[in-house]
Image (cartoon, rainbow, N blue to C red):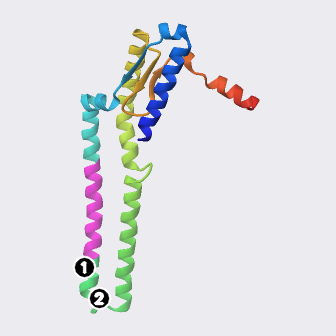
Amino acid sequence: MRRSIIILFLSALIIFLVSANPIFAQQGKIGYVDSQKIFAKSAEFADAQAKFDKDVAAWNKQAEDLQTEIDNIQKELDSESLLLSKAKREEKENLLKAKKAALQDYINATFGTDGKAERRNAELVRPIRDKIMRIIERIAIEHNYDIIFDAGSTSIAYAKKDLDITDLVLDELSKGE
């Protein structure tokens, strides 16, 4: 919902700018790409995804092995708790807590924010994304596009540098309203 509102707003803004400036209307050219479709049909992306999936499977296997250790210690503790001395039972309980903490740490380090999985995915996808952006820019320049939107996200894939009004906005902002 939010993405479509942003795209609608950006489209309305572009239409306003095009209609408000006759010179731009005669020369301006707008296009869009569907990055999701590009990635879906990219052999390079499919290869990167296969590598990533293989890595994730290995990380999941390691987490499952840790969970199996925890389950085995818990079973031992449950079945032998009456037979164990207080010190031995506490030792097993402490080992169980340590293994659970180690599993949680592993999951966070691997699958959490900025974890191993996120970094690996970025490492595999970044070169492909950069290549696609270079192709979009080359096509935009060759075919005289002013702006190319990415329909797969809420971003602009390419825009001519002379359309950037950021400095004007900053100048006005520094003057105050």
Does 174 sit left or right of 86 as displayed? Answer: right
Front-lying residue, 31 or 110: 31
| Amino acid type for the residue under numbered disc 2 | Ser
Q: Which residue is mark 1?
A: 75
Front-lying residue, 71 or 41: 41
The residue sitting at 28% across, 66% down in the picture is: 67
Q: Is residue 5 above or below residue 64?
A: above
Q: Is residue 77 above or below residue 133?
A: below
The residue sitting at 54% across, 9% down in the picture is: 22
Q: Where is residue 123 shown, x and y percent of the image?
A: 38, 38
Q: Which residue is mark 2?
A: 81
Front-lying residue, 134 or 104: 134
Q: Where is residue 153 shown, x and y percent of the image?
A: 40, 34
Q: Where is residue 165 shown, x and y percent of the image?
A: 60, 22
Does 36 sit left or right of 144 as displayed? Answer: left
Q: Where is residue 103 shown, x and y percent of the image?
A: 36, 64
Residue stretch in magenta: 56-73
The residue sitting at 41% across, 55% down in the picture is: 109
Q: Secondary structure at mark 1?
A: helix
